[in-house]
Amino acid sequence: SAACTDAGKRRVCYFYDPEMGNYYYGRDHPMKPHRVRMTHELLHGYGLLDPRKMLVLRPEPAGDRDLCGFHSDDYVAFLRAVTPETQLDRMGSLRRFNLGEECPVFYGLYSYCQSYDAGASLSAAAMLNGGSRDIAINWSGGLHHAKKGEASGFGYINDAVLAIFELLKIHEVKRRQECCRNILDIKDVPPRGDQCPKSTISQRVLYVDIDVHHGDGVEEAFSTTNRVMTVSFHKYASYFPGTGNIRDIGYSEGKYYCLNVPLDEGIDDESYQSIFKPIISKVMQMYRPGAIVLQCGADSLSGDRLGCFNLSGKGHAECVKFMRSFNVPLLLLGGGGYTIRNVARCWCNEVCRVDTPSHIFIGGWN
Ligand code: TV1
Ligand code: CA
Ligand code: ZN
């Protein structure tokens, strides 16, 4: 909340659906939803699911209407209808929506999209809008490549885009106006907006992406608006999805509100932080978002099956800690992460320390 300083504890809510770990992309497929269950079990083992520490909630499944807030109706209808048995009769549509080897049609695909992915991120965003929590977490989200009308990069529904829409909901303007009855009291008027410093609701949302891959789907969705700024750090040059050039900065109204930080393979903690912190500090200072969405893809960790960076768990957690230090409502999403024991350790550690003010020493990766 606005009153929260870095010395204060954060009110955290964490979304988890016990069904999540059962969805299966296929034996050889690198995406393993089971890693989210491993993270959860690690949290359980450490006693971190205690309601005195954080609110643990089961996500509300998203409805078709929610999904169609970003995705096209025909694509959502196809996701709902297709099954592993019927897919072969629908080869044309399969190709059109980019379903196949990378984004397979598996058992329960649509309920996976509704709960595991979109539902939890939407519930988490709504929780931040309500103002009763400072930080909301959905490790099963962060599928940042999905497009309006097609699946991409192991993702079907772009939960980050849907969550950002939720954070920007305009009916909240009313509450903001009530909150700022005396608009003249606000000395520090933010650029291009009338955001109340007391409100948890935002005119502007900042999206930051530390997955090793470029957050192309989120960037594309908001490339022409200044109400969302997207910043992605990623391996660039002969690497999926191929986009994220440093010269790509957004279009029309959104020009300069898109930032790409292309990196070489093998980058370590020290180099990463020497780039991450100054960039984020400047963005925060200039953009002053009312909410932040941080995609915490763990494929930027050293030893990842698909990734090629050399970050330690401490270095990865440093990014989360830094984003938290601005005391702006924060939504943490998962993303990539393919050496699954490392993913579970990384995300468990980040949940463990995210509510704790930085002067308190916990141990381990402090
Ligand atoms: C089935 C079985 C699919 C084994 C995909 C690695 C597989 C990959 C597989 C794979 C794999 C990619 C491309 C391919 C360009 C395409 C969650 C020619 C051993 C957020 C998505 C990466 C990353 C997609 C998602 C990438 C995220 N890499 N084995 N596929 N085409 N696709 O390179 O950002 O982490 O690799
Ligand atoms: Ca990224
Ligand atoms: Zn990735």
Image (cartoon, rainbow, N blue to C red):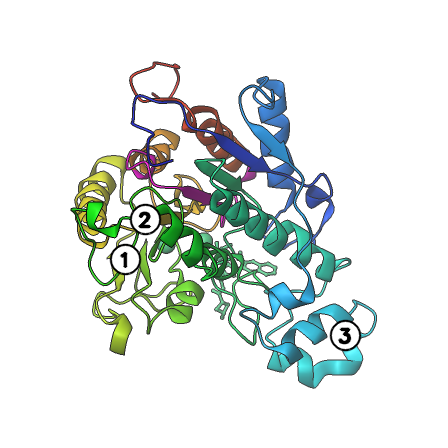
Q: CA distance from mark 2 to mark 1?
A: 9 Å
In which quadrant of this rendering is ligand 2 seen?
bottom left
Q: CA distance from mark 2 to mark 3?
A: 53 Å
Residue 175 location, x and y as percent?
A: 43, 51
Looking at the rendered structure, the kind of residue marked 3 is Gln
Q: Which type of secondary structure does the marked residue at label 1 adopt?
A: loop
Q: In the figure, is residue 40 to the left or right of 303?
A: right
- Residue at image coords 34%, 20%: 366
- Upstream in the sequence, badge 2 or badge 3? 3
Q: Which residues are magenta?
A: 323-341
Which residue is disc 1 drawn over? 194
- Upstream in the sequence, badge 3 or badge 1? 3
**Mark 2 touches mark 1? (CB < 8 Å):** yes
Q: Is residue 92 above or below residue 202?
A: below
Which residue is disc 3 drawn over? 87
Residue lying furthest front? 182
Which residue is disc 2 drawn over? 180
Residue 274 location, x and y as percent?
A: 18, 41
Q: Nearer the viewer, mark 3 or mark 1?
A: 1
